[in-house]
């Protein structure tokens, strides 16, 4: 489908003004009837993460990427209605150069550059595309397809040594700091539930980039996650990710701070909570018996 088909020149007759077409409206009602959940992203608590990592500061790993610490620590509010309308009307351009959607009865188109500005991040001159590294040029949705992991030489820096070829890449074998960061990422930037016993290809690439300070395209990462949701969300009941980032973008587009405050005062705003030390310790205990004893000692 092309953007011209998804957002035709004329709005459909009789459609709710929140949408442009009857098809978009039908997606909204489907999401509502199926009760598609919001991904419960956690805000990262840098002090708690430092304690969980044995006193080693974690914040500097994220400060290498302009704007990312604020997105993971401060942008916590979301409005469920805004998120549902957004996903119901979202169109992702084939090369992820722009997205289209409806907000407050208007059609918006945001380019990669505009998204970067609204998120407060920068697009590196020669960034790596994390989803491409994991899935190549596979047509989305990505996760049902064969994936590609970093080589043993590349990934060995994340694991306890010696790391020999063929060593299982499981969370309990990660070096202590990498283990703490991995647990935090799966609750925040790359929200995932289940499969605690392994590390997916996408998780390996993301963790490798952050631990080694390599640039990656955060806007492309964000768009890929949105795209995967709208393409297979109905079939596998995927949750709506990045509600807080989406609403941060939409609140800026409204050009009216009173709109956000009005929704907040009427109880329509939800807030993601911080990943506190106790939660960090509990998650670590569940995923790695090897590390749990140390985390108990600092809690």
Image (spheres, grey):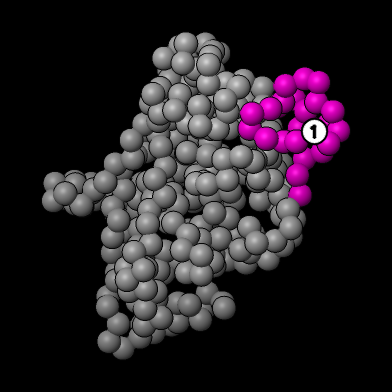
Residue shown at 28% from the left, 52% from the top: 79
Q: Nearer the viewer, residue 215 or 268?
A: 268
Locate the C terminus and report the quarter of the image it occupies.
Answer: top left
Q: Which residues are magenta?
A: 148-173
Magenta span: chief secondary structure: loop
Q: Residue 91, relative to residue 2: is it above or below?
A: above
Residue 295 versus residue 118 in the image, above or below:
above
Q: Position of residue 15 (x, y in %)?
A: 30, 82
Would you name the residue on which mark 1 appears?
Answer: 167
Q: Is 179 located above or below residue 108 in the figure?
A: above
Q: For this rendering, which residue is in front, 130 or 158?
A: 158
Furthest residue in direction left, as rendered: 266
Image coordinates of residue 35 in percent, x first then y, are 34, 64
SS at mark 1 in the image: loop
Q: Residue at x 60, y 22 (%)?
A: 290
Q: Residue at x 72, y 36 (%)?
A: 169
| Of residues 119 and 59, the one drawn nearer to the viewer in this rendering | 59
Residue 72 visible within the image: yes
Considering every residue shown, the one lying at the far right of the view is 165
């Amino acid at each position: 489908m092309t953007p011209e088909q998804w957002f035709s020149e004329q709005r459909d007759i009789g459609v709710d003004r929140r949408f442009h077409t009857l098809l978009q409206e039908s997606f909204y009602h489907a999401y509502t009837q199926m009760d598609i959940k919001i991904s419960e992203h956690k805000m990262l608590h840098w002090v708690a993460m430092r304690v969980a990592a044995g006193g080693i500061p974690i914040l500097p790993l994220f400060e290498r990427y302009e704007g990312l610490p604020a997105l993971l620590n401060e942008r916590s509010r979301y409005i469920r209605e805004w998120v549902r309308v957004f996903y119901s009307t979202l169109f992702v351009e084939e090369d992820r150069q722009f997205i289209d959607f409806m907000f407050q009865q208007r059609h918006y188109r945001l380019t990669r550059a505009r998204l970067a500005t609204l998120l407060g991040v920068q697009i590196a001159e020669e960034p790596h595309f994390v989803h491409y590294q994991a899935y190549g040029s596979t047509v989305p949705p990505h996760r049902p397809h064969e994936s590609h992991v970093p080589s043993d030489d590349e990934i060995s820096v994340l694991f306890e040594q010696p790391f020999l070829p063929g060593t299982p890449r499981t969370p309990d074998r990660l070096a202590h700091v990498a283990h703490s960061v991995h647990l935090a990422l799966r609750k925040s930037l790359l929200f995932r539930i289940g499969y605690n016993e392994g590390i997916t290809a996408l998780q390996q690439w993301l963790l490798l980039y952050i631990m080694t300070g390599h640039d990656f395209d955060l806007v492309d990462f964000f768009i890929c996650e949105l795209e995967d949701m709208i393409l297979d969300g109905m079939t596998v009941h995927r949750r709506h990710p990045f509600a807080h980032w989406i609403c941060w973008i939409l609140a800026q587009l409204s050009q009216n701070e009173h709109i956000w405050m009005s929704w907040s005062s009427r109880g329509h705003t939800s807030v993601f909570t911080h990943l506190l030390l106790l939660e960090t310790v509990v998650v670590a205990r569940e995923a790695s018996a090897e590390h749990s004893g140390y985390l108990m000692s600092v809690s």
